[in-house]
Image (tube, helix red, strand yellow):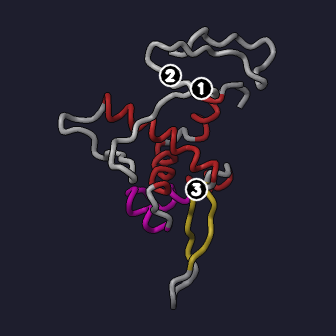
Amino acid sequence: MSQACSVARTVALLSDPWMVLVVRDLGRGIHRFDDLARSLGVARTVLSRRLSTLVGAGIVERSEYREPGSRARPEYHLTRRGRDLGVVLAAMMDFGDRHLAGPEGPPVVRTHAGCGAAVRLVGVCADGHRLGADDRVLLEPGPGATPGSPAPDPEEP
């Protein structure tokens, strides 16, 4: 991708909705090919292609398992890179819960196993300051910026 934009690169990687849903299900603990296909309701050929792409991108690793008396079958797990996408999926879930859930509310609620309180995403700067709705976040060219590319917007939306 020629665009020097981390959002564009991530969208290019996850551009197909099945990619996001495969990562979601792997993160939920569904690791076996047949279980993924059943959970997603996706054609096996589509799932196979998406998993191959995710493996090639270093998001997923493939291994094999063998149940007694059966042939070896594939099993998939998120890599560290894939687990890092959990925050992206959580942000998508929060958006959907706030703006797209029906009147009955969200279908899944994230809670902290330690205390049972609802889990929510928060912004924190590198010095540990929690960002509120009124805090400004500036976008500045980073070390990977392309010389001559347009300057980023002065503030994040």
Residues in magenta, as a range: 32-48
Q: In the rendered view, tell whether residue 43 sits above or below residue 18.
A: below
> Is 37 part of what is drawn in magenta?
yes
Which residue corresponds to the image point at 57% horizontal and 77% vertical from the top-left?
A: 65
Q: Position of residue 133 (x, y in %)?
A: 43, 17
Mark 3 or 2, nearer chain start? 3
Which residue corresponds to the image point at 45% horizontal and 62% vertical from the top-left?
A: 30
Q: Are marks 1 and 2 in contact (CB under 8 Å)?
A: yes
Q: Which of labels 3 and 2 is toward the front?
A: 2
Classify residue 82 as left or right of residue 103.
right
The numbered mark at residue 131 is 2
Between residue 125 and residue 151, name the one nearer to us: 125
- Location of mark 3 (residue): 78
Which residue corresponds to the image point at 78% horizontal and 19% vertical from the top-left?
A: 146
Q: Position of residue 53 (x, y in %)?
A: 62, 51
Helix, strand or loop status at disc 2: loop
